[in-house]
Amino acid sequence: MFHAASSLVQSPRSPRNRNDQHDQHDQSRDRSVGRPSPRPAAKRDAFFDNAKYLAIVLVAMGHAWEPLKGDSRVLTAAYVLVYTFHMPAFIVISGYFSRSFDGSPAKLKRLVTGIVVPYVVFETAYPLLKTYVDGSPQDISLLDPYYLTWFLCALFIWRLTTPIWKLVRYPLPLALGIAMAASATPNIGGDLDLPRVLQFLPFFVLGLILKPEHFALVRRRSFRIAAVPVFAFSLAFAWWAVPRMNSGWLYHRNSAQELGVPWWVGPVMQLALFGCSLLLTACFLSWVPGRTMWFTALGAGTLYGYLTHGLLLKTADYRGWFDHRALHRPLGEIAVTVVVAVLVTLLCTAPVRRVLRFVVEPRMDWAFKRDAAELAREREKAETAAKAEQAEQRQKPGVRGQQEQPADVVG
């Protein structure tokens, strides 16, 4: 979408070649008379698939750094930096691809099969893992998202409210106001991880109102160059802030009072973090390649990598694998980072998607009524195809003359 493909650059053709092409086009057009034109297949944008893959790798790396960061100020600074923008970037992209949600039966069905079902499955799997692997009994509660499942819960709520954000005049300021209020309200409660849902809401709404030209803007060469000192300064600032800042602000799940500061600090921090996260997200997107890469196809399986890598990391944590002293040294931290990056990459591949599709993206046609409008469209399509076939038969040589003869003359 944002880059010129080299395959589109064609060499000049001679007039004879152009005329031959026009003749071929006219012949193909004549042959297609009466046939419904095929609907062009939707083409995935390599830029967004690349961005989703790179974002999910950063998410997995951040989760792997969590049990190791206490022994290294540099690793903690990298952790703070990544946590400032990796989920905001993922949420902005999710909002951008939620623009078409209109509450129609087809969209609601996709919402149930693609979000609700995986949420129920993995919200059950994570407590069972803790109960039987860690030996600590954990209750299963669909109202209390466990570990990574909060994102599915949030995405379900955000998408349901999409028609509202498309209706109001100033959606982003309204979403920011809600997030700021949530950061100063300790009595919201933890059901459905609502504080985090509300505090991350502005990033989703921002994705809803973005247009392709906005992504093209941040991918200019000048912006990519400017992103280098921005990231360098941000990493240095994160290193300085490690002993001075409560990293709980980055999770967006607690109010200011719960973090031990006055209520008014919550809205101020919410605005400050939104600005920082937005800037770093733009810098991150400026480095995302727009051409097809070896990992581009993995962008379609990021939800698989997101949901399943947590099971493996939690298993390693429960088994005490992160307690080895060698992993708390620079080489060990680098090794863990590389292993986790490879692991989440494998979890996004086609074989894993085929195996887990029945729980992450089930069809479940048996569970839903057929939409009346969809049935009407199918009938109309069948009638159009039948009429096109009849028109094609009438145009064949000899068929017209036979059809026009009286029945008593034949034979």
Image: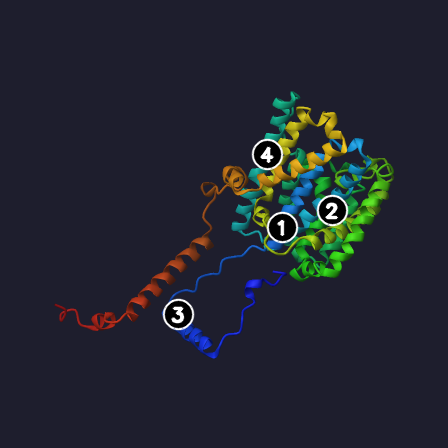
Whole-number angstrom distance, CA of label 1 to CA of label 3: 37 Å
In the foreground, 129 or 23: 23
Of the numbered discs 2 and 3, the one sitting upstream in the chain is: 3
Residue 85 has which mark? 2
Lower sequence index among marks 1 and 3: 3
Which callout, 4 or 3, points to the residue nearer the camera?
Answer: 3
Question: Is residue 94 visible from the viewing direction of this image?
Answer: no
Q: Circle 4 sits on which residue?
A: 122
Instruction: Give the spatial CA distance, label 2 vs label 3.
Output: 51 Å
Indicate the position of residue 224 as horizontal and vertical percent values.
Answer: 73, 56
Q: Residue at x 79, y 45 (%)?
A: 181
- Residue marked by disc 3: 28
Which of label 1 and label 4 is nearer to you? 1
- The residue that mark 1 highlights is 50
Question: Which is more toward the observer, 243 or 401?
Answer: 243
Q: Mark 1 or mark 4, which has the lower sequence index?
A: 1
- Labelled pair 1, 3 in contact (Cβ < 8 Å): no
Q: Quadrant of residue 222?
A: bottom right
